[in-house]
């Protein structure tokens, strides 16, 4: 993976590198490998991840079709 440094702007190059690493899932992989994970815990985590991905895709699909109003995640005044 390469990031070009333009005009000696190292800070911007670091931000770009971090964003690329985040997209590739490197940070998540490092966190998972820090400690041993039992096979049963791994299966449980992977199933939960799959459910999370499926729900996210379903939500995006419904949003595209216009079936669900888009919410900003904020609650109204109390």
Image (spheres, rainbow, N blue to C red):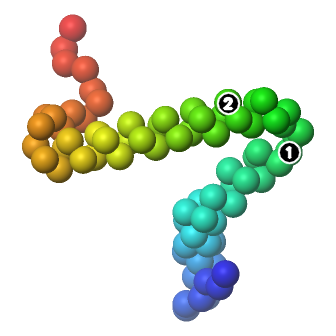
Q: Is residue 57 above or below residue 20?
A: above
* Disc ID at residue 34: 1
Q: Could you tell me how far apart the alpha carbons at marks 1 and 2 are, in whole angstroms?
A: 18 Å
> Which quadrant would the C terminus be assigned to in this image?
top left
Could you say whether the residue bearing mark 1 is in a helix, strand or loop? loop
- Residue at image location 35% in from the left, 46% down from the top: 57
Q: Is residue 22 above or below residue 56?
A: below
| Pick the front one: 37 or 16 | 37
- Residue at image location 61% in from the left, 72% down from the top: 17
Please identify the residue farthest to the right as the structure is shown.
36
Q: Is residue 24 visible?
A: yes
- Residue at image location 48% in from the left, 37% down from the top: 52
Could you say whether the residue bearing mark 2 is in a helix, strand or loop? helix
Q: Are marks 1 and 2 in contact (CB under 8 Å)?
A: no
Residue on which disc 2 sits: 44
**Residue 73 locus on image (x, y percent):** 29, 30
**Residue 61 locus on image (x, y percent):** 24, 47
- Left or right of 47? Residue 35 is right
Quarter of image, res 21: bottom right
**Residue 49 locus on image (x, y percent):** 56, 39
Callout 2 crowding tier (Cα within 10 Å): few <14, some 14–19, many ≥20: few
- Residue at image location 57% in from the left, 69% down from the top: 20
Please identify the residue farthest to the top as the structure is shown.
78
Give the foreground label among 1 and 2: 2
Precedes in sequence: disc 1 or disc 2: 1
């Amino acid at each position: 993976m390469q990031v070009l440094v333009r005009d000696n702007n190292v800070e911007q190059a670091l931000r770009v590198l971090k964003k690329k690493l985040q997209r590739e899932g490197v940070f998540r992989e490092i966190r998972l490998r820090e400690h041993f994970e039992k096979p049963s815990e791994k299966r449980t985590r992977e199933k939960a991840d799959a459910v999370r991905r499926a729900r996210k895709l379903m939500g995006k699909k419904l949003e595209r079709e216009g079936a669900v109003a888009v919410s900003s995640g904020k609650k109204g005044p109390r």
